[in-house]
Image (spheres, helix red, strand yellow):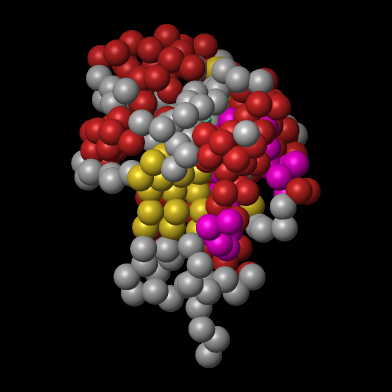
Amino acid sequence: MAMGDPRPIGIFDSGVGGLTVLSAIRKRLPHEPTIYLADLFHFPYGPRYQDEVRGFAFEIIRYLEARDVKLVVIACNTATAAALNQAREHFEIPIVGVISPGAQAAVDATQNHRVGVISTEGTMRSQEYLHAIKEIDPMIGVFQKACPELVDIVESGDADSPRAEAALERDLAEIVRLGADTLVLGCTHYPLLKPAIERVYPGAFKLVDSALTTAAKVERHLDHSRLRADSTEPRHEVLVTAMPQHFHDVGANIFGETVDAEEVRIWEQQKAQRT
Ligand code: DGL
């Protein structure tokens, strides 16, 4: 039998949100080594121009390639919207995003053909969810809402607080009024808001979380390309481009386990090399 491919899977986000994807991948694929990179140097991505976010994503993919990863997961909706298609044209390495898995899950979940999507401004402006959902089923009504404050709430460790509940009550009111039975958590920070959503609008929606569906997609890719690892004790690295202490604290707050992050200076190094 062929030996496994021991190279790690590279996963990145602008901050802690992508840890929801990392954790789903680690559960589903327990033998795979991983490198997770949080670009806190540029957080948040949501309000930035697409070109700028694409530039960050390309640098990170180059960095991960140099670290010899076998597959890259863009564990950020904003970066997926801004960079996935062009990154696939530019890089040979296989790249998976989080939008089409989430769109498919929403189409499978809705019974009344009405889907709400909450995301950052960047993801909403890109209209990628609308297109991805309507590509699968054009009869589905898609109601989108940008909720930038929710990103800050999660990133500062307040996902399960009265502040989160107040913001959700306001941000989801229109989608509830429009009768969507399914809500796509179109930002990797938002799955951490599930308990607060359930408290504010109990039973109103089926919640679609692209972390689980993305992990399933990664598994299919690895199997299809015969890239699976068989390590019994795979190595997991967590890297940040700034503020390792913040990551450590918020990671502990959110996941109940401390996340030891190492700082890598992708941009400073490049600036230094150029001068
Ligand atoms: N994690 C990003 C996403 O999924 C949002 C956070 C940010 O604005 O950087 O869209």
Q: Is residue 208 above or below residue 181?
A: below
Given residues 275 and 53, the one toward you in this image is: 275
Residue 248 in the image, given as x and y percentages of width and height = 27, 37
Residue at 66% over, 33% down: 55
Q: Which residues are magenta?
A: 66-88
Q: Residue 194: percent from the left, percent from the top?
A: 35, 31
Answer with the quarter of the image where residue 218 lies: bottom right
Q: Give the residue displayed 35% in from the left and 25% down from the top.
A: 154
Res. 17 in view: no
* Front-lying residue, 162 or 34: 34
Q: Is residue 135 above or below residue 91?
A: above
Locate residue 82, reporting x and y percent. 67, 32
Residue 190 on the magenta segment: no
Q: Residue at x 51, y 67 (%)?
A: 7
Which residue is found at the position 32% from the left and 17% from the top? 164
The quarter of the picture where the C terminus appears is: top right
Relative to 56, 33 lies left or right? left
Viewer-nearest residue: 17 or 59: 59
